[in-house]
Image (cartoon, grey):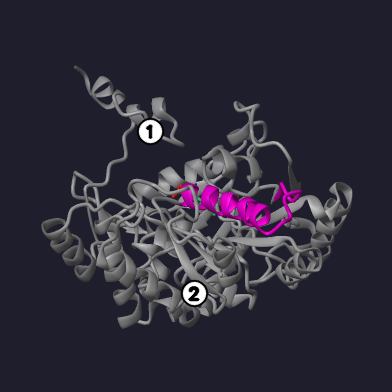
Amino acid sequence: MDNNNTLDAYWMGYTANQHFKAHPRLLEKAKGMYYWTPEGRKILDATAGLWCVNAGHNREKIVTAIQQQAATLDFAPAFQMGHPKAFELAKKLVAITPENLNHVFFTNSGSESVDTALKIALAYHQLTGEGRRTRLIGRERAYHGVNFGGMSVGGIAVNRKLFPNLLAQVDHLPHTHDLARNQFSLGVPVYGVDKAERLEQILQLHDPSTVAAVIIEPIAGSTGVLIPPAGYLQRIREICDQYGVLLIFDEVITGFGRLGKPFAADCFNISPDIMVTAKGLTNGAVPMGAVFVSDKIYSAFRQDDPMAINFYHGYTYSAHPLACAAAIGTLETYQEENLLYKASELAEYWQHALHSLADLPYVIDIRNLGLVGAIELEPRKNEPNKRAFQVYLDMFEQGVLVRTTGDVIALSPPLIISKPEVDQIIITLRQVLKQLSS
Ligand SMILES: Cc1ncc(COP(=O)(O)O)c(C=O)c1O
């Protein structure tokens, strides 16, 4: 069997399988800020894996916690049964989430967290006598994972186009990306709060009393790092409050310190009714997601009959012992090293370093907030996405892992990154961008 055939058994998601299998990029081990390929090449991780390895790779406390847990309790049924670490983790998590979010439902991924959150929102209104509230509002250029709810409220055409039977009764806000007015903004862009007013129009169009929830990524990551304009999220919150619509924040990438505070909700000083997380929850070491809800929502599910099940929803692997152990080890690591706040210390250096690339060919925008960055390139004529993908391939050859989405190079390094490592990313980008053929 040739190499191509050997690799072909694995159908890779969100991957150009034919190209990959002809030119595989493999990672064999990792430590701290670095990956190593099977040939022993050292690769600086400028993406925290996939926005998840916030504390850096293979951290000792997390590794030990998982190993010990696997040897102690491999699995416990998640329904009508529990294990101590699940309750310990829940308590530790609600101590760091925004003040009003005191209860947590465990899942195994961001996608499951999103669909869980949408189901909670719909069920909440049914249980509180507002059963007419069945509509969900998402946003253009939003990514909320790959399950049917998340795809429906998501706003990425290619993700949706083979699936004509998405959820009904969904509408979308416009995205906030506005190159003409906000090009090369430092941090939060100035223009675009007006885009929030579209929510009011959508609510009026459908009758606000039919709308259950609005779901928003505080920063849209997967569609090119779209930073919310000043005042935009606050205005969305106000409109939701005015019409009794629940606000769901999808913090799958912004959660756990990415923006210099534990959550984007803290950063923008907004209390969502429901908050969706995953990724940084276990530092990427074991799959896990978590949905946080307010007391108001949790108590709506309370039953008069104590023997009655509160919510007909859950996963076999909800609060899996290995994931709980990994998450506790992760939280301890974050706390010991102040990582939930660390991005704020580096944010200015990071911003300055990124924007130093503004003079390079094809660079049409640079965006940043906390330890998130994006460099948008002018697309090649009739070949969208190819220019940024070339940068991604060249960067990997030069020993730095970046990510691309469309013609945007997205950066989200582990929060343990040092200034010299920031410099290495920027120097390599400069070199690669400078040598880009047309
Ligand atoms: C904002 C957001 N929501 C949901 C998801 C889906 O998470 P997962 O891939 O863990 O299902 C992602 C993944 O990148 C995301 O960025």
User: Which element carries disc 1, helix, strand or loop?
Assistant: loop
Q: Which numbered dot is residue 97? A: 2
Q: Is residue 381 above or below residue 71?
A: above
- Give amino acid for label 2: Thr
Q: CA distance from mark 1 to mark 2?
A: 34 Å
Q: Is residue 146 above or below residue 314?
A: above
Q: Which residues are magenta?
A: 110-137
Q: Residue furthest top?
A: 1
- Give amino acid for label 1: Met
Q: Residue at x 46, y 65 (%)?
A: 104
Q: Residues within 10 Å of mark 2 (few under 14, many from 20)?
A: many
x, y percent for residue 422: 42, 69
Which SS does the magenta portion mostly show?
A: helix
Does 112 lie within the magenta span? Answer: yes
Residue bearing the label numbered 1: 12
x, y percent for residue 361: 61, 52
Q: Residue at x 45, y 61 (%)?
A: 306
